[in-house]
């Protein structure tokens, strides 16, 4: 089972500020997924990154995959209260997802 | 298309009892996975089924079991409940699994409380 380390564990910021969440592993990811989970709901897939050095954008969210495919980051520009949630990274191997511990993001209005 | 549905949404049991949770996948999805989410351990994989066969199993005691029916619906059972089994149990479905392009869709979960 691949171990994923996420940091920070908690983030509380003011509306309009930027934030970055990190996901690291000691072994190479075949692919890396980012999810967001809101209270009372299951995780929802935001993006899948596959190629080392890849950058994907989803509106104000930017996802980067490290060149060595051992790390990834999620950057949110001008955060809004609607971005509040638990952000999870996950690797998909052997028909299962292995998740990081998650980063709880709170955006204050 | 209807999403993944899980029943019941909330459940309260006492130690020693058993519980059965149900999951209906998205129509056409044949792979169903179960996960346990707790504040201390995060999201952990329980097992995955495809066409009624278990393809992978997580590191949980034998008290946790599951099955999948021919219509792809799945159930998981926990026997002899312990306080530590209190968690959100999430079901997820996808077309067939095995490829990173095959998106996994999660249900809203069943919140189990063991007293």
Image (tube, coloured by chain):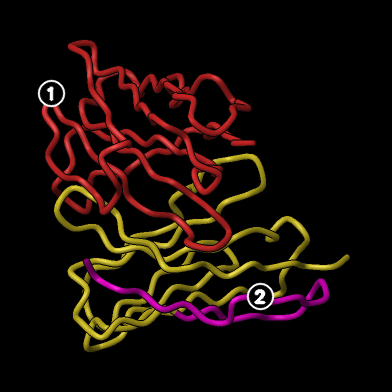
Give how far apart the Cα atoms at labels 1 and 2 are: 39 Å
Seen at 30% across and 67% down, the residue is A32
Q: Which residue is mark 2?
A: A10
- What's the mark number on residue B51? 1
Which chain appears red? B
Q: Nearer the viewer, residue B94 or B32?
A: B32
Q: Position of residue A51 (x, y in %)?
A: 21, 74
Q: Quadrant of residue A26?
A: bottom left
Secondary structure under badge 2? strand
Return the chain for callout 2: A
Q: Nearer the viewer, residue B30 or A52?
A: B30
Return the chain for callout 1: B
Q: Position of residue A7 (x, y in %)?
A: 52, 81
Q: Does the segment drawn in magenta span residue A8?
A: yes
Chain A hue?
A: yellow
Q: Is residue A47 left or right of residue A96?
A: right
Quadrant of the snapshot with the N terminus of chain B: top left
**From where the camera sits, is residue B73 visible?**
yes
Q: Is residue A60 left or right of residue A66?
A: right
Crowd class of label 1 (few under 14; some 14 to 19; many from 20; radius 10 Å): some
């Amino acid at each position: 089972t691949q171990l994923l380390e996420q940091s920070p564990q908690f983030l509380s910021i003011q509306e309009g500020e930027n934030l970055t969440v990190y996901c690291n592993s000691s072994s190479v990811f075949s692919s890396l997924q980012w999810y967001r989970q809101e209270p009372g709901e299951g995780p929802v897939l935001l993006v899948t990154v596959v190629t080392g050095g890849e950058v994907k954008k989803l509106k104000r969210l930017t996802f980067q995959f490290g060149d060595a495919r051992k790390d990834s980051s999620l950057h949110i520009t001008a955060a809004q209260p609607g971005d509040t949630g638990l952000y999870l990274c996950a690797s998909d191997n052997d028909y299962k997802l292995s998740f990081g511990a998650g980063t709880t993001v709170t955006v204050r209005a | 298309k209807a999403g993944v549905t899980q029943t019941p949404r909330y459940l309260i049991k006492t130690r020693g009892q058993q519980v059965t949770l149900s999951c209906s996948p998205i129509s056409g999805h044949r792979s169903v996975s179960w996960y346990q989410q707790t504040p201390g351990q995060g999201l952990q994989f329980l097992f995955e089924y495809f066409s009624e066969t278990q393809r992978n199993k997580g590191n949980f005691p034998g008290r946790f079991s599951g099955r999948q029916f021919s219509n792809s619906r799945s159930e998981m059972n926990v026997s002899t409940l312990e306080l530590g089994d209190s968690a959100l149990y999430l079901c997820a479905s996808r077309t067939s699994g095995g490829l990173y392009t095959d998106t996994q869709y999660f249900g809203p979960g069943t919140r189990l409380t063991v007293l």
